[in-house]
Image (spheres, rainbow, N blue to C red):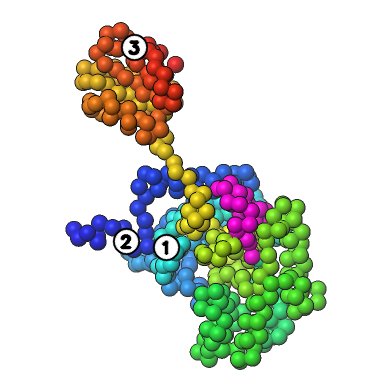
Amino acid sequence: MSQSKLQPPRGTRDFYPDEYRQREWLFDHFRSVAHQFAFEEVDAPTVEHAELFTRKAGEEIVDQLYHFELHDRHLALRPEMTPSIARMVIARAGALRMPLRWFTVTQNWRYERMTRGRKREHYQWNMDIWGEPSVSAEAELIAAIFALLDAVGLERGDVKLRINSRALLEESLREGVLRDRPEAFAPLCVAIDKLDKIGADAVTRQLIDTDGAVHLDEAAARFVVAMLELKDLGEAARLAPAGSQALADLERLFQLLDAYGVADQVVFDASVVRGLAYYTGIVFEAFDTGGELRALCGGGRYDQLAETLGGKPVPAVGFGFGDVVIGELLKDKKKLPLLMRPVDDMVFAFGEGERPAAIRVARRLREAGRRVELTLSGGKLKRALADADRVGAARIWLLGPDEIERGVARVKDLASGRESDEKLEDAGS
């Protein structure tokens, strides 16, 4: 087997023990915050029917699917979790008590161009609320995002959340450049979502492309791109139609975020539209304020997704928070912990004659809930002490011929260096 084949496929990762401990530390925080907000964890298959993800709005995600045909079925590795959650809701719509507060921590796959913080395989924390039409749901989710950032040790100000409303953008454009072409709005959002990646001129060219789904004239395209530069909700309000519900929702959301104590970490940004066509209302993305990384997380309202998949309309909002970008930011900020192996006790037998007694000691300690490493062969005491210290064990239990004869184990507390004899039958008590 070639050396290259001994590496994981490009864009995927191996998790050795130290990396796995850091991953589980982050996942534990995902779950802890979700539980604080009274969300329930669910899961779904990694392999789904491909048509769950193949929508027709020109989304990049469609071309990034890992998909295959097997026994006349077209299947795909899930690129995101939201459609799977929608499928689950539709399947039991009549039996579920709304609103639902669900979360997931799942592995996802996209064959995309890799940059720092972007891989082809990643894990993602999702929180979704189904059955609540008011922006109180968005406020709750955004508060959870900041609770997670606090929990992992980031300082307030390290991350800002940008908020916009696709509904407000759609209302404004349908009063003007899309008055006669409302069907162009979804592909327009897909195009303008690339603003940070390809720049204003390239987005303008996509909007006026006569072979594209939007094909605005140049003046209209430049007007749309100029709208995306708005960073003040008051300025955006002047372009909104009278009595705009989308504007009222945004204003209400900022009021609620103030009550959560996070309003100063949130800004209005008209350029945030999200690249997935199913978003219908408020959308948001979190970025590091240093501007070094891509979005840490993103989400928004998708009230029509269930309907597009064949179910009844259900209001819904959620976010996805990947593990890769937050890992990079935690490294940059020196907030990623170095975690030791979770070992409480090490049990060392000087020779094979003492091994049965060592096994019984280890068994009693494990039954008492201790995490115990039993050395599997003899060796030098110096090596055993160094290993116990390296793994962070609190104690090492030493069993030699003299200890066995006296019915005790010599126990050394590795923090204080104190040693004592413990009766073998008392181990674990």
Residue 191 visible in the shown view: no
Q: Residue furthest left?
A: 1
Question: Which residue bears the numbered disc 1?
Answer: 119
Q: Which residue is mark 2?
A: 9
Q: Quadrant of the N terminus?
A: bottom left
**Label disc, if present, on residue 408 of the rendered structure:** 3
The residue at the point 71 percent across, 58 percent down is 263
Spot occupied by residue 279 in the image (x, y as percentages of width and height): 60, 68
Q: Nearest the camera: 161 or 185?
A: 161
Lower sequence index among marks 3 and 2: 2
Residue shown at 37%/50% (left/top)?
15
Residue 195 located within the stretch drawn in magenta: no
Q: CA distance from mark 3 to mark 2?
A: 52 Å
Dot 1 or dot 2: first in sequence order is 2
Residue 246's image quarter? bottom right
Q: Are marks 1 and 2 in contact (CB under 8 Å)?
A: no
Among the two numbered marks 3 and 1 on one chain, the one whose residue lies closer to the N terminus: 1
